[in-house]
Image: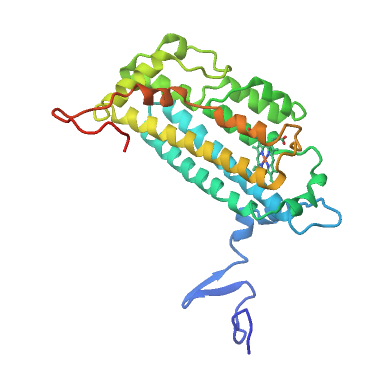
Amino acid sequence: MSTDAPDPGPAEPRSRASREVEPGVERDFARNLSYGEYLDLPTLLSAQHPRSVPAQHDELLFIIQHQTTELWLRLVLHELSSACELMAADEHRPALKRIARVKHIQAAMTEQWSVLATLTPSEYARFRAFLATGSGFQSWQYRAVEFMLGNKNAAMLDVFAHDEGQHRGLVELLHRRSLYDEVLAWLDRRGHELPGSVLGRDVTETYQADPGVVRAWSLVYADPDRYWAEYEMAEELVDLEDNFQVWRFRHLRTVERIIGSKPGTGGSSGVPFLRRALDLTFFPELYDVRSAIQDVTPAGYHGGDGDV
Ligand code: HEM
């Protein structure tokens, strides 16, 4: 007999919910908290509501891709929020642990673009009209992550004016110090003397690069052994930003292959709008410092002068 499911064998005299998990190990799945209850799977798995009429097979992929990203963003916010609190308390080691997890989440978020890339332009065109003006531009969690990393933009609050809770949450984050603000304050407390104008800046404004901060990071990069904690933190932040940009880039390329040069459902120019975000930076001085680092030439070396 050929069948996909294994043969369950003869019925055993157990209660209906009691099962032998392994030889000698029994569990009564009805009496204890179940997997589905713990994860609230009935809610999670009934939250996909395709809108296309007639129903289009590929819309479920589109919905789940967005929902899984939003779930990951929820965890990113949880980790970043904790990282900010830890840095404020001079607990940089556990903060690095939080950041390390965020980096792995970012990698998962970026990798999943390849799933959506299986959606062809013709498949998307069959249900795009049903999205009306819905757009990732209205992702509250995405904007919250940007604010937390330091890309503050008060104008974004208007997008959430219709939802009092979301609007209030973003206003609160706008007024809170970003991860970079916390790292710079920590750097100062560790004796690197940052400019007062940076430490006391209006945190609701987009962060502007400051030459005094470049100088502080230059000293760290000139002597990594002495300033290992600061050096490690700087490189972790660069990883975070790098990963964020790779996500943005994969989004842009996926959008380009699916809608070409059409405008977005959120009303933007589409791909040109997304391309502009690739010029944004969360931690400007960590890039500026790279140009300030002096090449070290060992004494007596008279070799080549190329990059390779
Ligand atoms: C067929 C797939 C997709 C297309 C064609 C698309 C298209 C676009 C476009 C054109 C924009 C610019 C705003 C607008 O005018 O709508 C945008 C923004 C955005 N999208 Fe997507 N997108 C897709 C999938 C996704 C997915 C799966 C996510 C994951 C949550 C996502 C998240 C975002 C975010 C966060 C923004 C705001 C970016 C910013 O403001 O810098 N998009 N998208």
Q: Compare residues 243 and 259 and report the one nearer the observer.
A: 259
Give the residue furthest to the top: 196
Give the residue furthest to the right: 53
Image quarter (top left, top right, bottom left or bottom right) of the C terminus: top left
In this figure, which colouring scheme has been used for the structure?
rainbow
Q: Quadrant of ligand 1?
A: top right
Left or right of residue 50: residue 20 = left
- Expressed as whole percent of the image width and height from the top left, the position of residue 229 reads 32, 30
**Compared with residue 127, is residue 189 higher up or lower down, i.e. above or below?**
above
What residue sits 80% from the left and 52% below the top? 126
Query: How many discs mark residues in the rendered view?
Result: 0
**Compared with residue 174, is residue 27 higher up or lower down, i.e. above or below?**
below
Image quarter (top left, top right, bottom left or bottom right) of the N terminus: bottom right
- Expressed as whole percent of the image width and height from the top left, the position of residue 27 reads 54, 70
**Compared with residue 82, is residue 62 higher up or lower down, i.e. above or below?**
below
What residue sits 76% from the left and 32% below the top? 267
Give the residue furthest to the left: 300
Left or right of residue 286: residue 21 = right
Q: Quadrant of residue 16?
A: bottom right
Q: Compare residues 145 and 123 and report the one nearer the observer.
A: 123
Q: Compare residues 175 and 237 and report the one nearer the observer.
A: 237
Left or right of residue 180: residue 156 = right
What residue sits 47% from the left and 41% below the top? 103
- Expressed as whole percent of the image width and height from the top left, the position of residue 2 reads 63, 86
What residue sits 34% from the left and 27% below the top? 230
Q: Quadrant of residue 274?
A: top right
- Expressed as whole percent of the image width and height from the top left, the position of residue 3 reads 64, 83
